[in-house]
Image: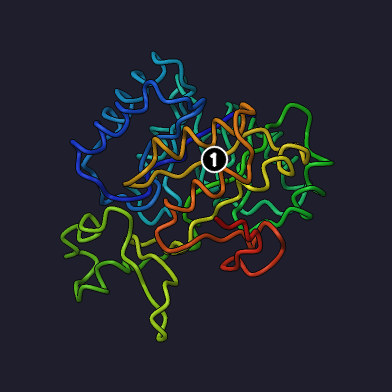
């Protein structure tokens, strides 16, 4: 089974982003997704910068995929998307149907924000050139298994195994609103929160993370305890999501599970220290996403 690192979802400064990806050159990761998927105003890096990082990681032996925005709101954003889709050097993670249309006839990855909930849709996208499908995070294992039994030949399947769940996008900027700013005068306030801005319930319990126009779960999705189940159901790639702290250790632990060096249950215990607001696995089990049903302790 392969191990991937999804695109960076937070707004980090230019120096931090370059240092972060430089640190991945020797990391035991097979696939790295690059690019801005949340907000087009985040321009610390432009496409040429992302391509520079892509070339460097490819030289280090990684498969590199360029990811597109998940919510297109303006012609300028569409123009950038089309530039990414037009490149013939790297595959593309298409996160909305505009990217799929721009990429039709050339290989692309179906991003997790495209609604694929049945084998008919999957076959349609495979016919348009899709070579890999990243399953939506809310898709339960039973529905996923039904789709996998009818998936087109040669199509890889990837699922988020560790990271905060990307739940929703909006034309509004939640980070700006939470700081009493307008979206056009945001001042890139989201950059003050390297792992998103926590949002608690009225009972002071961690609930969500605000990340610009994106809402994430506060709890970290941790499916490593289900490794054998995911493998046996035909999943080809496990995805990790970037976070500010602990990523080298997270990568090493999950790779050790894939390589058979440690038991999945031991890995779950090791990874809990990197779940800032606790863990969850409800969606995988067909339950409320916020729940944790795998109760390994210690």
Residue 46 x %, y %: 26, 35
Colour scheme of the picture: rainbow
Q: Secondary structure at mark 1?
A: strand
According to the image, label 1 marks what residue?
A: 239
Give the quarter of the image for residue 74. Answer: bottom left
Report the number of discs.
1
Position of the N terminus, as image quadrant, is top right
Instruction: Give the x, y percent position of residue 213.
Output: 36, 62
Position of 79 compared to 2: left or right? left
Image position of 35 (left or right of 267): left
Most foreground residue, 223 or 283: 223
**Left or right placement of residue 232 versus residue 35 in this view:** right
Residue 155, quarter of the rendered image: top right
- In the rendering, at what x and y percent does residue 60 appear? 40, 15
Question: Mark 1 Cα within 10 Å, few/some/many (few <14, many 20+)?
Answer: many
Quadrant for the C terminus in the image? bottom right
Q: Residue at x 43, y 32 (%)?
A: 66
Front residue (pair 246, 58): 246
Please give the name of the residue rendered at 47% of the width and 25% of the height, measured from the top-left corner: 28
Instruction: Residue at the far front: name it.
Output: 298
Q: Quadrant of residue 50?
A: top left
Going 19% across and 64% down the picture, which residue do you hit?
A: 186
Q: Position of residue 180 (x, y in %)?
A: 20, 76
Residue in the image at 38% along x and 49% along y: 9
């Amino acid at each position: 089974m392969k191990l991937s690192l999804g695109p960076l979802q937070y707004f980090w400064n230019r120096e931090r982003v370059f240092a972060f990806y430089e640190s991945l050159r020797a990391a035991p990761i097979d696939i790295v997704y690059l690019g801005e998927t949340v907000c087009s105003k985040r321009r610390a890096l432009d496409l040429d910068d992302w391509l520079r990082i892509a070339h460097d990681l490819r030289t280090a032996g990684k498969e590199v995929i360029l990811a597109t925005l998940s919510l297109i709101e303006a012609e300028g954003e569409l123009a950038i998307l089309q530039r990414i889709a037009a490149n013939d050097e790297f595959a593309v993670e298409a996160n909305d149907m505009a990217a799929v249309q721009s990429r039709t006839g050339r290989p692309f990855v179906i991003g997790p924000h495209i609604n694929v909930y049945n084998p008919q849709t999957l076959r349609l996208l495979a016919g348009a050139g899709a070579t890999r499908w990243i399953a939506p995070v809310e898709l339960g294992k039973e529905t996923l298994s039904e789709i996998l039994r009818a998936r087109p030949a040669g199509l890889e399947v990837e699922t988020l195994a560790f990271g905060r769940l990307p739940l929703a996008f909006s034309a509004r900027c939640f980070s700006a609103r939470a700081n009493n700013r307008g979206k056009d005068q945001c001042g890139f306030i989201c950059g003050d929160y390297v792992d998103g801005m926590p949002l608690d319930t009225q009972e002071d319990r961690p609930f969500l993370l605000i990340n610009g126009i994106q809402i994430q779960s506060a709890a970290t999705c941790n499916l490593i305890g289900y490794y054998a189940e995911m493998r046996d159901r035909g999943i080809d790639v496990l995805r990790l999501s970037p976070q500010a702290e602990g990523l080298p250790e997270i990568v090493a632990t999950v790779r050790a599970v894939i390589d058979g060096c440690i038991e999945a249950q031991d890995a779950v215990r090791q990874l809990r220290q990197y779940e800032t607001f606790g863990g969850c696995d409800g969606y995988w089990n067909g339950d409320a996403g916020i729940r944790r049903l795998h109760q390994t302790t210690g």
